[in-house]
Image (spheres, rainbow, N blue to C red):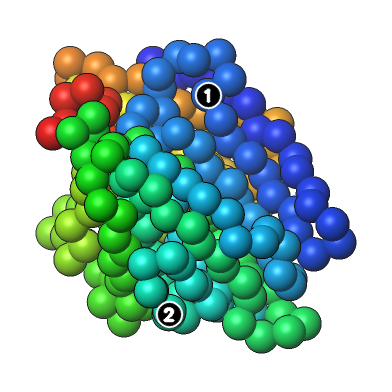
Amino acid sequence: MSLKLRMDRMEHGAQFRAFVLRDHARTGAMDPVLGVDHAYMAGPTFPPHPHAGFSAVSYVFADAGTGLNNEDSIGTRNLIRPGGLHWTAAGRGIVHEEVPADDGKVAHLFQIFVNLPAGKQSAPPFAISLEPENVPVIEAPGALIRVPLGEYGTAISPMNPPTQITLLDIRLEAEARLPVTIAANRNGFVIPVQGSVKINGEEFTAEAPEAPAFPASSAEQTILLEAGQEAAQAAVFSGVPIQFQE
């Protein structure tokens, strides 16, 4: 059984636009994810800013025109290259900033906000990174699946974050079909990234005002992704609700 979550458009100056997914109705269907911004950033946008009590995760899509330079108050200085992921566990508090690495080029990314288990919300902050070449990739008929977080089939991400979630970055060739299984007792949701994709028979696009979510069930759930006459891209998230994570 699925439900729909609202996707809002957001712009911040001339250099940043995003499609913002939040669980406004408080259905709990995104838990442990608090929100996702599907963003395009062409220049410095947000000044150094604080976070506490959750994690801020940046995943730069492999097709991005540039990566992100990341800096934070615990001394991290790194480049998040296209295809890579950086996880900032804010814990008791951290200040960070991310800006496109190359002027005039666009960073295409997810900014993902993930809850921390209660026992980790006041822990010292830390940051971990996954380089693009270390992201597992699975090929299926008409599909390419990158696994920056969690697992898919035999592919398991080497990243071990403080909150366990799965993120699958899926590219579909024209008219390709791919079933994705959400394990029992896990929430799941899908964000179209590029093109038009049918999700369990209903069509969605990256600019649609809604995205489908699949609340946790005692049985596993299967989500069928289908591309139309053109190639498409979508991201599938899943995770155990935060109260069941330590």
In the picture, measured across the screen, residue 117 lies left or right of residue 4, that is left
**Residue closest to the eye, 233 or 163:** 163
The residue lying at 61 percent from left, 66 percent from top is 108
Of label 2 and label 1, which has the lower sequence position? 1
The residue lying toward the viewer, choosing from 63 and 47, is: 47
Closest to the observer, 82 or 50: 50
The image position of residue 154, as x and y in percent, is: 13, 59
* Location of residue 150 in the rendering, given as x and y in whole percent from the top left corner: 23, 52
Q: Nearer the viewer, residue 168 or 221?
A: 168
As displayed, is residue 61 above or below residue 188? below
Labels 2 & 1 near each other (Cβ < 8 A): no
Badge 2 is on which residue? 78
For residue 159, what is the image quadrant? bottom left
SS type, badge 1: loop
Q: Quadrant of the N terminus?
A: top left
**Residue 133 image position (x, y, % from top left):** 31, 81
Which residue is at a point 38% across and 74% down the rendered structure image?
75
x, y (%) of residue 226?
49, 45
Task: Work out whether 123 lies above or below 169.
Answer: above
At a point 62% along the width and 72% down the height, the residue shown is 99
Q: Where is 4 relative to 227, above or below?
A: above
Q: Which mark is residue 23?
A: 1
The amino acid type, in three-letter code, at marker 1 is Asp
Q: Amino acid at mark 2?
A: Asn
Q: Is residue 18 visible?
A: yes
